Image (cartoon, grey):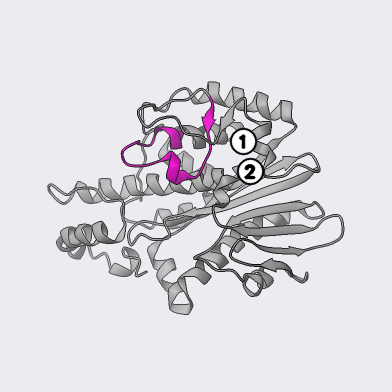
Amino acid sequence: MAYLVGTDEAGYGPNLGPLVISATVWRIEDGASTHDLYKLLRRAITAKPPPRTVTRSRRVVLADSKTVYSPDRGLALLERGVLTMLAVAGRPVGTWREAWQALAPESLIELDREAWSAGYDAPLPADDRCGEVAKAAERVRAALAEAGVELIDVRSRAIFASRWNSLLDEGTKGAALSNLTFELLCAMLRKFDGSAVSVICDKHGGRNRYQALLQPHVGEWLVEVYGESRRESMYRWGPDGGRTQVCFRPRAEAHLPAALASMASKYLRELAMRAFNAFWCARVPKLRPTAGYPRDARRFKRAIEPVQAELGIEDVHLWRVR
């Protein structure tokens, strides 16, 4: 057997709300590739979202979160995909806080330090058009069993404003994203010592060279460069028979492991913004919620400033400087 891993993030550009990075791990028969998974699992999973007027699909949609979610389309497709795959992985969730516990337990302590999420909870699914998750999970499990594929894990890390700002004091935004991704990736890889692992990652800020950033995270092994270009940057390390290969490609979300990572990241970020908006909208009359992206974030920040000052919440805990 071999393992496929995909990573992706959501929230790299906003000023408000967390950056979320996720990784998914799949066990497959030797010789399969990331290109095979959609074909192998086509009975239950598709990369093609239905028309925007349709909120449900018999097959679970797992694709780049940008195609699955938009404010116009709503949360239903994104939520159905993530909740279904969590159920498949043996971690069904029914509340906001359970979703964080299932995906990002290491982030819960920091989450509860945020004024807007401390003590917050809400039932899930948040979108009542999500559909029956249990039945979808049954179909996916059957397809996985037939194909000889297993979803081993889905894990996320959330990086909140204060930590993100401190990381940017020490280096560039792109390097911070890479190092945070490699922290999560290598923590997961340590569970599979001695097994062949193939990792697909989206390019980080257009970067083509990753060896110097990867090397401190992989221990005693030398990270070998097998190509660095705009199309693909590839690296390998580890013992014979248990090598780890990492490929960075534009649009890595075209591969199922990275697609699910993209969706998990986006879903957790959307859940975080629900708590954030609920907190501030309850305290500032007629305040419109925000997605946290720069132009609208500045509007939102101006509107909450008087209450923020009253509550003694410093900008470093609220506003991501880049």
Which residue type carries mark 2? Asp
Observer-nearest of 197 and 285: 197
For this orientation, the residue located farthest to the right is 240
Direction from residue 150 to residue 290 in the image, left or right:
left
Q: Where residue 154 sits in the image (x, y, percent)?
A: 59, 44
Residue extent of the magenta highlight: 59-79
- Whether residue 76 is in magenta: the answer is yes
Q: Where residue 191 sits in the image (x, y, percent)?
A: 72, 52
* CA distance separating discs 1 and 2: 7 Å
Residue that mark 2 sits on: 153
Q: Where residue 150 sits in the image (x, y, percent)?
A: 70, 36
Question: To which quarter of the image does residue 70 belong?
Answer: top left
Q: Quadrant of the C terminus?
A: bottom left
Q: What numbered label is drawn on residue 89? A: 1
Mark 1 / mark 2, whichever is N-terminal: 1
Q: What numbered label is drawn on residue 157? A: none
**Label 1 Cα neighbours within 10 Å, binned few <14 / some 14-19 / many ≥20:** some
- Which SS class for mark 2? strand
- Which SS class for mark 1? loop
- Whether residue 72 is in magenta: the answer is yes
Direction from residue 41 to residue 172 in the image, left or right:
left
Q: Are marks 1 and 2 in contact (CB under 8 Å)?
A: yes
**Label 2 Cα neighbours within 10 Å, binned few <14 / some 14-19 / many ≥20:** some
The structure residue drawn at horizontal position 26% and vertical position 51%, both measured from the top left corner, is 290
The structure residue drawn at horizontal position 57% and vertical position 26%, both measured from the top left corner, is 137
